[in-house]
Amino acid sequence: MEKIRVGLGERAYEILIGSGVRNLAAAPDGVRRMVVTDSNVAAFCGEWLNTLAVADRFVFPAGEASKKIDTVVDICRRAAALNFDRSSRFLAVGGGVTGDMAGFAAAIFMRGIAFEQIPTTLLAMVDSSVGGKTGVDIPEGKNLIGAFHQPRRVLIDPDFLRTLPQKEIRCGLAEIVKTAVLFDEKLFAELERDPVSLLNPGADMSRYAAIIRRCCELKAEVVARDEREAGIRALLNYGHTFGHAVELLSGFSISHGEAVAIGMTAAAEVAVRRGRWNRADAERQKALLAALGLPCAVPQEFDNERIIKAMEHDKKNLAGKITLVLPRRFGEAEVMRGVPVPEIVAALEAVHA
Ligand SMILES: NC(=O)c1ccc[n+]([C@@H]2O[C@H](COP(=O)([O-])OP(=O)(O)OC[C@H]3O[C@@H](n4cnc5c(N)ncnc54)[C@H](O)[C@@H]3O)[C@@H](O)[C@H]2O)c1
Ligand SMILES: [Zn+2]
């Protein structure tokens, strides 16, 4: 078992990674707890969930559509009906949707109770379960309601990946490539070594555990340095300004991970055209994404004007100026505010299908 500490003073916590780590949640510790999970995870992991000594299990229908305030209210009402108090705890068992929502419920129930993250998707293991961003969607936009609320601990058991559909594995891999480009060329090279086998986690779980550990280490460091995204944490939005636009315009038929892959390719193109990143490295990024079965081209039917409009609405922009994260070399990137629209159009032209 590997241990990583997220150094946040009195809010510090540990990330425990390893096969079987999920069983640390089984030990009754005198604290009243409620599992929050979705319908798929309840089915796939039902047997294990039954072993947990908890007061109750809150199961919601799987999918982003459930990530809304009504579900959070239902979680809080269930906790109230169970007479939960400020020493009680939520266990988020699932993907990013579960973690974001259970975390937000924990942030606001009785003005804040503890919660633990037990991620079951690759994306949640390498990204969303660490860092304390919690929240829900509203029709006006994703994650527009939320709070920073750090978990009490994170238990990452890579064995959960055995049942995860390949489409979801790919989504997580897109974020892993993002992390590698931003912070760690060695990790990037490790992914390049045999990308195809990464699509099947069961083939080499120990390799997977090592990759997850490295991503958590890097994210923990970023979060410890910049919990509230005043600086370096903003780099994690690499590929996401283009990505969110593509996701939105596709009516969410293009998944988040696929959209981020397209977004990183477009952002890389901007960086290369500005003379900030070299073409050869951008091509390496593209080749790795392609080997992982991720798309790298903006679909033909999306016209540039609509993409730009959607990008101008991105919530990470300030005063409507488009903000992009641009790589400088593997392991180094910068946040660029007010990237001129013609530059973005030129890059989009170059990466259109
Ligand atoms: N808080 C953050 O810092 C942060 C960061 C990135 C993304 N997010 C959020 O995370 C969400 C996306 O997370 P996600 O991709 O994990 O989505 P998700 O939680 O919807 O999970 C994806 C699918 O996999 C299923 N699933 C989960 N574990 C499984 C398992 N072990 N076996 C089989 N099926 C399983 C789920 O039921 C769901 O259908 C978005 O809402 C996004 O906004 C948050
Ligand atoms: Zn993302």
Image (tube, grey):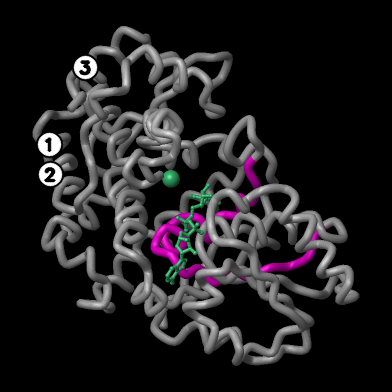
> Residue drawn at (83%, 74%), measured in percent from left and top?
87
Residue 14 seen in the current view: no
Query: Magenta segment, which residues?
Result: 112-137
Q: Please say if the residues under marks 2 and 1 sit with CB atoms less than 8 Å apart.
A: yes
Q: Nearer the viewer, mark 2 or mark 3?
A: 3
Quadrant location, ligand no. 2: top left
Q: Residues within 10 Å of mark 3 (few under 14, many from 20)?
A: some
> Which residue is denoted by mark 3 in the rendering?
349
Which kind of residue does numbered mark 3 sit on?
Glu
Q: Please say if the residues under marks 1 and 3 sit with CB atoms less than 8 Å apart.
A: no
Q: Tell me residue 351's x, y (percent).
A: 20, 25
Q: Is residue 119 magenta?
A: yes
Which kind of residue does numbered mark 2 sit on?
Ala
212 vs 226, left or right, is left
> Which residue is more in the foreground, 1 or 168?
168
> Which residue is denoted by mark 1 in the rendering?
283
> Which residue is more in the foreground, 282 or 33?
33
313 vs 249, left or right, is right
> Which residue is denoted by mark 2 in the rendering?
287
Regarding mark 2 in the picture, which secondary structure is present there? Answer: helix
Q: Tell me residue 110's x, y (percent).
A: 87, 60
Q: Residues within 10 Å of mark 2 (few under 14, many from 20)?
A: some
Q: Tell me residue 11's x, y (percent).
A: 67, 61
69 vs 301, left or right, is right
> Residue drawn at (21%, 56%), measured in percent from left and top?
186
Which kind of residue does numbered mark 1 sit on?
Glu
* Image position of 274 with respect to 128: above or below: above
* Image position of 309 with respect to 21: above or below: above
345 vs 156, left or right, is left
Q: Quadrant of residue 211?
A: bottom left
The C terminus sits in image quarter = top left
> Residue drawn at (20%, 46%), measured in percent from left and top?
289
